[in-house]
Amino acid sequence: MPYRLEIALNPDLFGAEGEGIRRKAFHYFGLKLSQVRAINVLTIDADLTADQLKTIQTEIFTNPVTQTSSFDPIPIEFDWIIWVGFRPGVRDNPGSTAVEAVEDILGIKFKPGEAIYTSKRYCLKGKGLRPEDADKIAGELLANNIIQRWKIYSQRNWDNKTGTGIIIPRVRLDHKPVVEPIPIDTDETLKSISDERNLALNPNDIPTIRAYFLDSKVQAERALVGLAEPTDVELEYISQARSDHCNHNTFQGLFHYKDLSTGHAEVVDNIFETCIKEPTLSLKEKKPWVVSVLWDNAGAGQFDGDHYYVITGETHNSPSNMEAYGGAITGIVGVYRDPMGTGKGAKLIMGGYGYCVGQRDYAGDLTPHLHPRRLLDGVIEGVRDGGNKSGIPTTFGQLLFHPGYMGKALVFVTAVGIMPAQINGEPSEQKKTSPGNLVIMCGGRVGKDGIHGVTAASEVFSESTPAGHVQIGDPYTQKKMHDFILEARDKGLIRFITDNGGGGLSSSVGESALFSNGCEIELEKVPLKYEGLDQWEIWISESQERMTVAIRPEDLDRFLALSKKHAVESTVIGKYTDSGKLHITYNGKTCAYINLDLLSSGFPQWEFDAHWQEPDKRGLFEPVIREPGDYEALLTDILSRPNICSREWIVRQYDHEVQGTSVIKPLVGAGRDVNSDASVIRPVLDSEKGLAFAQALLPAYSAIDAYHMTACTIDEAVRRLIAVGADLDMIGGVDNFCWPNVQYHPQDNPDGKFKAAQLVRSCRALRDICLAYGIPLLSGKDSMYIDGYLAGRYGETHKVSALETIQFSTISVINDINKCITMDSKIPGDLVYILGETGNELGGSEYYEHYGYVGLNVPQVHSRQFATLYRALGSAIEKEVVASAHGIYRGGLGLHLALVAMGGGLGMKVDLALVPSNSVNRIDTILFSESAGRFIVTIDPENRKTFEDIFKGLPCSCIGVITDKSGDLVISDSKNRGKSKTIISIPVQDLKAAWKKPFGELI
Amino acid sequence: MKRVNALVLAGYGLNCDNETAYALELTGASAIKVHINSLIDGSVGLDDFQIMVFVGGFSWGDDHGAGVIQAVRLKTNLGDKMLEFVDRGNLVLGICNGFQTLVNLGLLPGFRGDYKTRSIALTFNDCGNFRDDWVMLKVNPSSPCVFTKGFDTMELPVRHGEGKFYSDKAVIEQLFKNNQVVVRYAMSKGRLANNRFPFNPNGSINDIAGICDPTGRIFGLMPHPEAFNHWTNHPDWTRDKEKIKRRGGAVKPGTTAGIRMFQNGVDFICGGY
């Protein structure tokens, strides 16, 4: 018999959760509530005695100091009650831990089907609150209909005896698993089945797939195991492996590139090979610290003689757009499995995030599934819980608003790990499966969740995207698995390890079987969350928190004992062979039998037309603006722009210091509230070496040319590391492409050819700049369909495509963390220097965007000159003659001078006439041009000679001095080019107030 | 000097075990990370240890109140063994999730030798969110707490969503009367925060950040001493370094406040007090 336990805070206690909802209801919808109280509801679907219920109520679920609880509805005043619970099959993390605790204290085991479910009941009070207001709060604030359901009660229909009743979201499938043969008599038949089953097979692949199954030799072999036509399991396997998400068909495609201005045409074959793989391999030759790239779940670099660091970056866009919290937590927890599955397994040491969303206060006619504000809130919280509960410091992140991301918001997640260089005398970065090794699945169980997630990510987002691919990550289960995996690794038990992410077992087993050249899987052994899954569903389900591990049979007992100690489920599901076949059975009957080499042979390359037109020929031009007079108001307004202002509220809710490794935090300075250029950690506690990490995003420049967008993004990410003390020669990179669809279609994607050309150009910039700076690409990913269809005001829909976006992450070993520096000005009297030249490069700038312009003169990267300058700055920091260094990034010199002053909480006096520049004559251009390759540096006047000697012959000029506490930022121009000699004179604290204002209320 | 053995709990979502063990090792102690299950199944016993640390993290995901399930599990499976450990004159330290566990076990406040009653809650921060920030702590010089001897103030990071110290008036009064209130949130110069956010980051009653039992040998606090194990952990270190350089001083300072706190515990066991 099921029971419902309600738990509430004592009435005299402040309820932070309810108060948060009350505030949001006002800020989001203007609804004034006087009180919101939240009640936690546990629905216990298990046979327990009255005594047992009493025990768990008092010992586990009720805090005697702060809470009251009851098996009857708790009477709390309300005008409206909203109950919110999960839909069946949605991951209920607190429900699972409740079962663990109950089993432990009562010394019992729950029977199959028994469970505990959590839900919430909110009691709302507010004068004049209408039914539609309650609907709005339920549907747009408290619940998301994709994963949750809700009930609303007025005072009239609430019965205080029955309350919400007992609602049990148990999955009941009542379905007998069945393997279906798929007819392939014609291409059209297979195509229509692919559409019906949401297989997302590329039409071009269909003839190859049919040819394989119609081959007489293949048919003869299949007959021996009792198979004729392909099974659904087999086609699902092929579909997963061939999806753009797994196979990167776009990057490996054939681009017919044409420059429309010159008429020059060329064929660009496989941009992955030419722009990513070749440059990285050539750099690996020259840089012995590059350990492992281009094949594993993450790339590896040398940290010191005994350790390698590993890094990778991912996006989790489509799911986050459907369910922001669930999508984001699944994303961060998922990317953390990549280092765990790199080499023989790495420990997680650092994470990063990047969010690209529509305007937070968007009030226009388009209606995305989630309003950008709600989406952003959910994403922030998802990464918070995913990172914090994993015990991994989240040390760096970015947030960018642009209307293009209304169609599909982007969620970037980055993971860094570390592993010993050797394990039991074997290189840790190497791993392979061998015939006879056991295939083990560790971690969570398999349910219907995430089915077709990979193929959905390879499609444009629409209202018909199946909601089933939305999941809720479980960092707790994964943290236990992480600790287990590391101990198993150190005992030498792991021969091969990879994670179950996109494509589930299909991908992880399929890819690991390539090493031994075969496997036999007994699908009925896979532990399920509930019965009734079809075989193909078990095979491709993306249920989270699972790793696939290969071990030697003789190690099985030790492996399982260790697994038990860590309370992690591990199951042998098959063995590796050298048969050349992926062989899957279910209760002894074969349901898949495929040549493993099928996927590497014979599939046609995707093809794209790519047409480039120079920006001026596309009608872009420099806007005609006369010089402003009021630079003080202008700078203050730029500081308050959503893409510039403080985001302290996000940083503070992310644990960035766990593991005790923090060296340079995300927020620095006298007030500990200004963003650092990069973060630095000391991952090996008894070593003075560090890892510096930073990221950059500059999609605005794509409106002019994605080549320069990419070049500037890489340059910024590199400069960020240089600014804290990294050595250019030690920097590695991670590229994360997010691109709108590049396949031309006359009606659906009329500018597809241009977007394809932008992709080719972006990749060329990636190649050029990485080669020039010597940056191997340790890892990278692409997400190719950042478009969405949004409903408008009149029932019409609009396709909204985001700007071509690349997030570039940089990482570098720091030889001596004690020499790292931060961006904040340090001491009055210090000299202020500008390194690098300011050019007339306002195209795509924040300044032009402030006025609504794009412009033409996009910033360009002069990599050779820049590299010389970066090495010089590296040497000055190494000699400890630099007090602070800060790159000049988006917003330009004026904004970044203000940030340096705000960081130090000190005044600053500078003369713009002294700024090294290249034929720039206007004050606004000097202040807001976004020329790359520049820094603001402050030094002790005592070090002047040493410092200037280092920069002899380079663009480096002392432009002023740091002044007193509570001083002003004073910007003047001794050339008198502005309307007055003193251009700006504002108290630094006023600048900071303006910078903090937009999001200052958020916590 | 005898070797001090410290047990550092691990597993089930705890996540500060590594740096806590490192901090203890810096003091000369031997620190061993022990999985909760190894303690429960008896493969590791408490007898070999003099210090037991309940570390930070999210045990059981913090799903039913932070530290609640960890306390239930230990109480159910270890029961009196922990009390016997305390009775032998040993030390127990609970940090963040560990502090939450100690109050849920009833090891704190431990009035009149009662180490089983739950009378204190560490509940959701008033600010409504998890928060990572450094705080200034004012140390009670009259407290019997072993770990804070010789401190007047100290700066440490907090990182929690459920750190609001709450209890009824009588318990709070008793805590002050017994000098069991060890550390309180303060302003930069050591003046009490008086519930001003963000100095008091969570709305704790009377700015209470950490308490001990009447013997001073059981200590729980929300801030993380183990995360201040190197001078570069401090948020101001690049600023301080520059100031020291200008005065011509040696740049690297000595032991951090966090390590000194662990050192106090280890010295106590060695008979330093």
Image (cartoon, coloured by chain):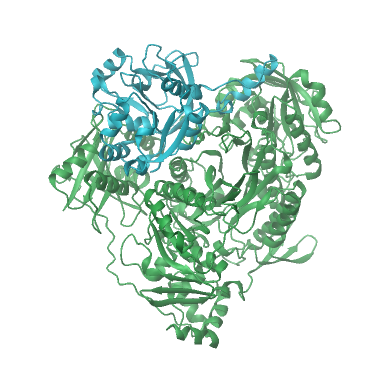
Chain colours: A green, B cyan
* Residue A692 as seen in the image, left or right of residue A155: right
Asked if residue A807 can be seen in this view, the reply is: yes
Front in this rendered view, residue B174 or A742: B174
* Residue A690 as seen in the image, left or right of residue A121: right
Asked if residue A1000 can be seen in this view, the reply is: no
Image quadrant holding the C terminus of chain A, namely top left
Q: Quadrant of residue B36?
A: top left
Q: Quadrant of residue A844?
A: top right
Q: Residue furthest front?
A: B1
Counting every numbered tag in the picture gives 0
* A357 w.r.t. A885: above or below: below
Front in this rendered view, residue B198 or B39: B39
Q: State the image coordinates of residue A162 (x, y, percent, origin top left).
A: 15, 46
* A539 w.r.t. A729: above or below: below
Q: State the image coordinates of residue B230 (x, y, percent, origin top left).
A: 56, 27
Front in this rendered view, residue A646 or A155: A646
Q: State the image coordinates of residue A686 (x, y, percent, origin top left).
A: 58, 34
Q: Residue furthest right?
A: A953
* A940 w.r.t. A252: above or below: above
Q: State the image coordinates of residue A840 (x, y, percent, origin top left).
A: 77, 38
* Residue B48 as seen in the image, left or right of residue A347: left
